[in-house]
Image (cartoon, rainbow, N blue to C red):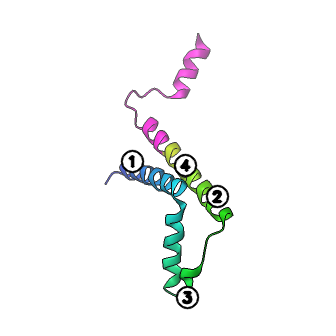
Amino acid sequence: MDSSKCRRFGSLWMIGQGLLTALVPQLCVRMMKRMIGNNFENAETLSAKPAYLRQLRALGIGLAAAGIAGFAMERVASEPDGASDSDELEGATEA
């Protein structure tokens, strides 16, 4: 499989996961309760503080932003026109 396709898929996954975490942080809290509940007793009685939910939202926004940036960079790198920024700068300085 082409590594370019893997990076694009990874970027799209990051965007989706980031948006999901930013919009519905309670899903992450439920998943953590299940994971902790496998090894500890009374994990279901835990509750997330509002500050933790805000931190999850911020993490989700950052993850989505990183995914968008990665996808955009991969898309620009695969453009077929072949013109790079350095070629354009050389042409501008010669004129």
Say which residue label 1 marks: 4
Image vertical order of residue 61 relative to residue 90, above or below: below
Residues drawn in magenta: 71-95
Q: Nearer the viewer, residue 85 or 6?
A: 6
In primary-sequence order, the first of circles 1 and 3 is: 1
Task: Look at the picture and state if 40 lies above or below 55.
Answer: below
Question: Which secondary structure, mark 3?
Answer: loop
Q: Quick one: SS at disc 4? A: helix
Magenta span contains residue 65: no
Measured from the top left, where is residue 23 in percent x and y? 52, 53
Task: Identify the residue at image location x=44%, y=52%.
Answer: 16
Identify residue for label 4.
66
* Residue 40 circle label: 3
Q: Nearer the viewer, mark 4 or mark 1?
A: 4
Residue assigned mark 2: 54
Q: Earlier in the sequence, mark 2 or mark 1?
A: 1
Please identify the quadrant where the C terminus is shown.
top right
